[in-house]
């Protein structure tokens, strides 16, 4: 069995942390029971490019219980939990190719390693497997029945590929499921981003000025949680509708340049490049903190910041201090990579339970519909989404009402008015 991990001796610690996460993933546990009986992936190979965390470990084990040969590499050079990688290899015989802090060439070598197993299903978080297959390894297409995608950035890339007419196999957009983005992107990113900023800096949020760039589901989550800890939150947006929503949610809304003059902490959550750039750095306050929670490390233009700086030093774990010619200092967290996964542990298992229940059931859906799907990006079927919500509520001991026959009939009618 081939693998490439940092240290197999970390397995014991990883096993305990996986056990802890599993306790908070009851929906995935139910799916595992089902997979053990039905073995939907018997004889199949699944290659995943995901953040190698305790929660991803629970997903990988679930897929293996369903009969799959599972190969895993990292979807970000800084997000791998090395103890988890060790336990997956030693305790579960799952091939993992991921090391926290791996450089760009190792990152892509690890992608090649999981693709060399000729997957039948690809599971992406950011579309790096799909893009590598489409640009360099088209020979793999004959074995692939479909793929799934976890995150907003990946969906944007895949829809662009689809629009250009060049998408070569069906994809299920897991991120588009309500039980994914309404919870993972909002409450998961909200909590874990604040967690990452605090672990890296130990800054008090109460009374600080925190600026969130982007008011999608992730930005909303960050704004909501930062406000909950007493920060004065400003939202920066380009979409009028989202900006208006932020205004009515009670946030100050301003252009980035204006916010640069008073912000203590910036968090980018847009999915776009150079959101914080030269034009902003020069107006920022001494000691400002810049963090990114978007998928790629492109949102803070670190090259421009380097060029403007006379000195760079690592002042704490995950904190690089850039001194500008003016003498002002700008602190960048986690090299501008996902602060929640680099400096903290990513989203809690409680929300990843729903995201990865979607991944597991979407993968099963691909096997059930082998050969029937087009080269398109599909949403997660609504019955799967609703079933996950139902199971999650059940696991939390929350009961809800159901419609009476009379109410159902009323909702289907048009005749009755006032
Ligand atoms: N993305 C965000 N948080 C995550 C986690 N805990 N595991 C896997 N992927 C994630």
Image (tube, rainbow, N blue to C red):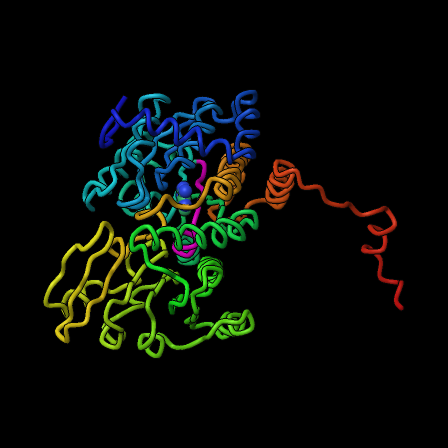
Q: Is residue 148 magenta?
A: yes
Left or right for 91, reference 62? left
Q: Is residue 33 magenta?
A: no
Left or right for 78, reference 247? left
For the point 40% across and 67% down, which residue is it? 207
Point out residue 217 in the picture as x, y percentages from the top left corner. Answer: 49, 58
| Quarter of the rendered structure image containing ligand 1 | top left
In the figure, 228 relative to 360: above or below? below
Q: Which residues are magenta?
A: 145-157
For the point 38% across and 67% down, which residue is it? 208
Left or right for 109, reference 83? left
Point out residue 405 in the picture as x, y percentages from the top left corner. Answer: 86, 46
How many dots with numbers? 0
Viewer can see residue 133: no
Left or right for 84, reference 220? left
Residue 96 placement: quadrant: top left
For the point 67% across and 41% down, which residue is it? 398
Point out residue 354 in the picture as x, y percentages from the top left corner. Answer: 53, 41
Point out residue 301 in the picture as x, y percentages from the top left corner. Answer: 24, 65
| Residue at the outermost left position | 310
């Amino acid at each position: 069995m081939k693998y490439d991990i940092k240290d197999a001796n970390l397995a014991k610690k990883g096993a305990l942390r996986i056990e802890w996460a599993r306790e908070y993933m009851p929906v995935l546990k139910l799916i595992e029971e089902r997979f053990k009986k039905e073995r939907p992936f018997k004889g199949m190979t699944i290659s995943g490019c995901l953040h190698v965390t305790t929660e991803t470990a629970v997903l990988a084990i679930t897929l293996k219980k369903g009969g799959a040969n599972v190969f895993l590499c990292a979807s970000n050079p800084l997000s791998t939990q090395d103890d988890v990688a060790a336990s997956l290899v030693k305790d579960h015989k799952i091939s993992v190719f991921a090391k926290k802090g791996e450089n760009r060439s190792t990152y892509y070598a690890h992608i090649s390693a999981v693709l060399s197993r000729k997957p039948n299903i690809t599971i992406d978080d950011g579309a790096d497997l799909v893009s590598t297959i489409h640009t360099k390894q088209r020979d793999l297409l004959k074995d692939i029945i479909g793929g799934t995608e976890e995150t907003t950035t990946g969906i944007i890339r895949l829809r662009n590929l689809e629009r250009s007419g060049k998408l070569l196999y069906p994809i299920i957009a897991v991120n588009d499921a309500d039980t994914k983005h309404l919870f993972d992107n909002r409450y998961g990113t909200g909590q874990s981003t604040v967690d990452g900023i605090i672990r890296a800096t130990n800054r008090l949020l109460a009374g600080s000025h925190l600026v969130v760039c982007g008011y999608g589901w992730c930005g909303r989550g960050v704004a909501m949680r930062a406000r909950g800890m007493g920060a004065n939150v400003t939202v920066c947006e380009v979409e009028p509708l989202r900006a208006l929503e932020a205004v009515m949610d009670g946030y100050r809304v301003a252009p980035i340049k204006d916010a640069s003059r008073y912000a203590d902490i910036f968090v980018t959550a847009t999915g776009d490049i150079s959101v914080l750039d030269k034009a902003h750095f020069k107006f920022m306050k001494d000691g400002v903190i810049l963090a990114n929670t978007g998928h790629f490390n492109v949102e803070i233009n670190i090259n421009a910041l380097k060029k403007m700086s006379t000195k760079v030093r690592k002042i704490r774990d995950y904190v690089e201090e850039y001194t500008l010619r003016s003498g002002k200092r700008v602190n960048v967290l986690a090299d501008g990579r996902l602060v929640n996964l680099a400096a903290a542990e990513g989203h809690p298992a409680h929300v990843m339970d729903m995201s990865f229940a979607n991944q597991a059931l979407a993968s099963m859906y691909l096997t059930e519909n082998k050969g029937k799907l087009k080269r398109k990006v599909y949403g997660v079927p609504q019955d799967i989404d609703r079933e996950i919500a139902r199971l999650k509520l059940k696991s939390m001991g929350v009961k809800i009402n159901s419609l009476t026959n009379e109410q159902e009939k009323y909702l289907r009618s048009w005749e009755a008015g006032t």
